[in-house]
Image (cartoon, rainbow, N blue to C red):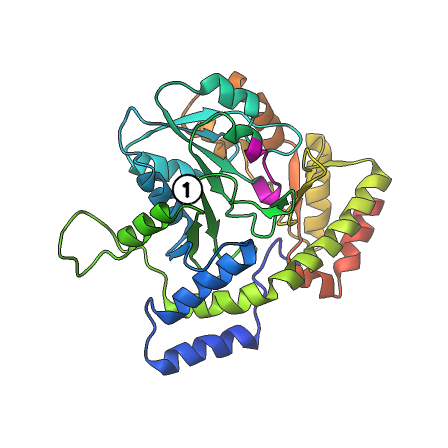
């Protein structure tokens, strides 16, 4: 039986929640969206009303930039090269200039040294992703005095010093895409401790029926999505515990085989194990992927070298050595929550130990 690299973990509870919404006759943005927003606030430690749900995580990033007043070709936004292109798209769609920097070789997160080197009078924001759920050192970057958007698309449940990621910068965002920590099929959320940012986010989202017009767009989440999200959020602690159990098995194997892997740089940074990413010589990565694939176990290279944002923009690779190395020497193993219950899970461990 094929073991996929990732899959959403859904059952009859999500189906029943969706059915109730359909039977209610109200399926667009409504009370369920508000309940989902407030439940997420409660989970991360915010007061109700300090999160705004959107159609996807990219919309949330785009609106975070808009809220910070970023809209000019002279406005620079610093982001890492080792990152999905959705963030790059959001910056360009705001009319701003992305400034690409390298990442750290241990946690794969944006390099503090490179951020400091690139800051100038035009720097209007820094987007800090918590790559594959491994917390980045946002508190240190915060001391530089530049507005920070925390990209927590993969980091729901990750913490820094017992505080949820997303609460250190000015604005945080989550994604609820099908492959994320919890899913609403598609969807995203923006959250902040600053009420004025939340008010602006809601103002952008409520695009229709306005007395005063300005260009806006429909970024709304539906009650169908939110109903699924509420159930998924109730399962989140179980999801995280299962991911931790799977990671423990992988960690034991890495110690036996003396293999390296992505890890936090600080022991007080708690990752959610959204991914378990091996880091090794390219020949070993190829051998691992080939062996596992032949046994029906799907693994992926998380970000290929041609997907690096520096390569998309045709920048000199010499300035992105760590990103280039990571892209060519990593393999992501299956770690979705239901894998721990899979009858063939032990087969993965056995193959890894014997290859």
Q: In which quarter of the image is the C terminus?
A: top right
Residue 335 in the image: state x and y as whole percent. 67, 53
Residue 38 in the image: state x and y as whole percent. 46, 62
Residue at figure coordinates x 34%, y 69% from the top left? 30
Based on the picture, tell me whether residue 137 belongs to the magenta stretch. Answer: yes
Magenta residues span 131-139
- Measured along the vertical axis of the image, is residue 282 above or below residue 41? above
Q: Is residue 155 left or right of residue 47?
A: right
Residue under label 1: 86
For residue 190, say whether it is visible: yes
Residue at figure coordinates x 79%, y 46% from the top left? 352
For residue 184, say whether it is visible: no
Give the camera-side residue of 82 and 299.
82
Give the camera-side residue of 231 and 329.
231
Regarding mark 1 in the picture, which secondary structure is present there?
A: helix
Residue 146 in the image: state x and y as whole percent. 43, 28
Q: Quadrant of residue 224?
A: bottom left
- Measured along the vertical axis of the image, is residue 75 above or below residue 196? above
Q: Is residue 93 left or right of residue 11?
A: left
Based on the picture, tell me whether residue 17 belongs to the magenta stretch. Answer: no
Give the camera-side residue of 116 and 309.
116
- Measured along the vertical axis of the image, is residue 122 above or below residue 138? above
Residue at figure coordinates x 68%, y 43% from the top left? 289
């Amino acid at each position: 039986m094929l073991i996929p690299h990732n899959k959403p973990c859904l059952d009859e509870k999500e189906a029943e929640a969706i059915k109730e919404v359909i039977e209610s006759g109200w399926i667009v943005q409504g009370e369920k969206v508000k309940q989902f927003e407030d439940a997420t606030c409660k989970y991360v430690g915010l007061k109700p009303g300090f999160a705004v749900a959107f159609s996807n995580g990219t919309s949330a990033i785009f609106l975070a930039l808009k809220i910070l007043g970023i809209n000019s070709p002279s406005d620079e936004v610093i982001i890492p090269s080792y990152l999905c292109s959705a963030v790059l798209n959001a910056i360009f769609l705001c009319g701003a200039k992305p400034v690409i920097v390298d990442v750290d070789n241990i946690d794969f997160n944006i390099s503090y040294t490179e951020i400091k080197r690139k800051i100038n009078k035009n720097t209007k924001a820094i987007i800090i992703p918590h790559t594959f759920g491994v917390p980045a050192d946002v508190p240190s970057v915060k001391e530089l005095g530049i507005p920070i958007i925390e990209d927590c698309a993969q980091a729901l449940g990750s913490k820094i010093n017992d505080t949820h990621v997303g609460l250190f910068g000015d604005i945080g965002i989550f994604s609820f895409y099908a492959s994320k920590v919890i899913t609403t099929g598609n969807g995203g959320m923006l959250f902040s401790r600053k009420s004025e940012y939340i008010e602006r986010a809601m103002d952008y989202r409520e695009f229709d029926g306005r007395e005063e017009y300005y260009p806006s767009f429909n970024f709304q989440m539906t009650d169908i999505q939110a109903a699924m999200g509420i159930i998924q959020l109730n399962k989140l602690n179980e999801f995280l515990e299962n991911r931790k159990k799977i990671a423990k098995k992988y960690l034991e194997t890495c110690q036996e085989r003396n293999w390296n892997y992505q890890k936090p740089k600080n022991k007080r940074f708690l990752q959610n194990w959204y991914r378990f990413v091996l880091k090794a010589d390219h020949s070993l990565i190829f051998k691992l992927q080939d062996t596992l694939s032949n046994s029906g176990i799907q693994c992926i290279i998380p970000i290929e070298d041609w997907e690096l944002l520096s390569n998309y923009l045709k920048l000199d690779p010499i300035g992105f050595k760590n990103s280039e190395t990571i892209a060519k020497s990593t393999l992501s193993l299956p770690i979705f929550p239901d894998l721990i219950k899979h009858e063939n899970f032990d087969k993965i461990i056995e193959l890894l130990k014997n290859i």
